[in-house]
Amino acid sequence: MVVRYLPKVEAPVQFWYPALIGMKIRIIQGDITKVKADAIVNAANKTLLGGGGVDGAIHRAAGPQLLQECKKIGGCATGQAKITSGYNLPAKYVIHTVGPVWKGGNHNEEKLLASCYWQSLLLARQHKLSSVAFPAISTGAYGFPFEKAASVAINTVKKFGQQYEYPREVIFVLFTERDYEVYKKKLKI
Ligand code: AR6
């Protein structure tokens, strides 16, 4: 009789929801400050004290109370995210995240950008938010090549949707028609 002792292999425990169950991904072209989602994401800078681009538009539309709350937070590191109320915005919350400045691609830019999406989604999940709208983080003043940034955004959101039930809907808000077409192609819509 041959007895074979097989080493016992402990499979790592993973909880997977079937691919993208519950999570819908939508794209719209327009101004994110008009979007009525539970949260909109702000492409902020490390001070969280406002700036140009989408950051300026969000602060203008939310009103001065947003800046008051941001002042109390004391900043945010690149790749991280912080949540505030949305004040005069149609969205209940603003999730502020700080994208990386593009420095040629060898400075961890893709990982940091992925982290922006992941950390923002984690905050949304912690607050049990159903819908979150993202602008194309880092693709304006911070100079991240648009196509590359779009792939990072889409892949990160999909990966999150495969693991977690909340948020149930992610809306990518693209400012220009050209940007909208890039997302449309990548999402095969
Ligand atoms: N709605 C949706 N998307 C917008 C809007 C809007 N109202 N306005 C601009 N975009 P940017 P960044 C798009 O420069 O590259 C700020 O000064 C825009 O077309 O807003 O992460 C901050 O304070 C682009 O695709 O953010 C930081 O200092 C995308 O939003 C710095 O800029 C991001 O462009 C952050 O730079």
Image: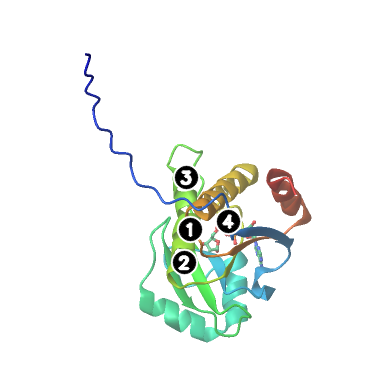
**Does the CB distance between marks 2 and 1 fall below 8 Å?**
yes
Q: Nearer the viewer, mark 3 or mark 4?
A: 4
Which element is circle 3 on? helix
Earlier residue among tags 3 and 1: 3
Earlier residue among tags 3 and 2: 3
Amino acid carrying mark 3 in the image:
Glu
Count of numbered circles on the image:
4
Answer with left or right where residue 127 lies relative to residue 11: right
**Does the CB distance between marks 3 and 1 fall below 8 Å?**
no
User: Residue 29 location, x and y as percent?
Assistant: 74, 61
Q: In the drawing, what numbered circle is on residue 109? A: 3
**Which quarter of the figure is the N terminus placed in?**
top left
Q: Disc 4 versus disc 1: distance between alpha carbons?
A: 9 Å
Q: Is the image coloured rainbow, by chain, by secondary structure, or in one colour?
A: rainbow
Q: Which residue is mark 1?
A: 164
Which element is circle 1 on? loop
Amino acid carrying mark 4 in the image:
Ile
In the image, farthest residue toward the top: 1
Q: Which residue is mark 4?
A: 21
User: Residue 14 location, x and y as percent?
Assistant: 39, 48
Q: Nearer the viewer, mark 2 or mark 1?
A: 1
> 158 or 82: which is nearer to us?
158
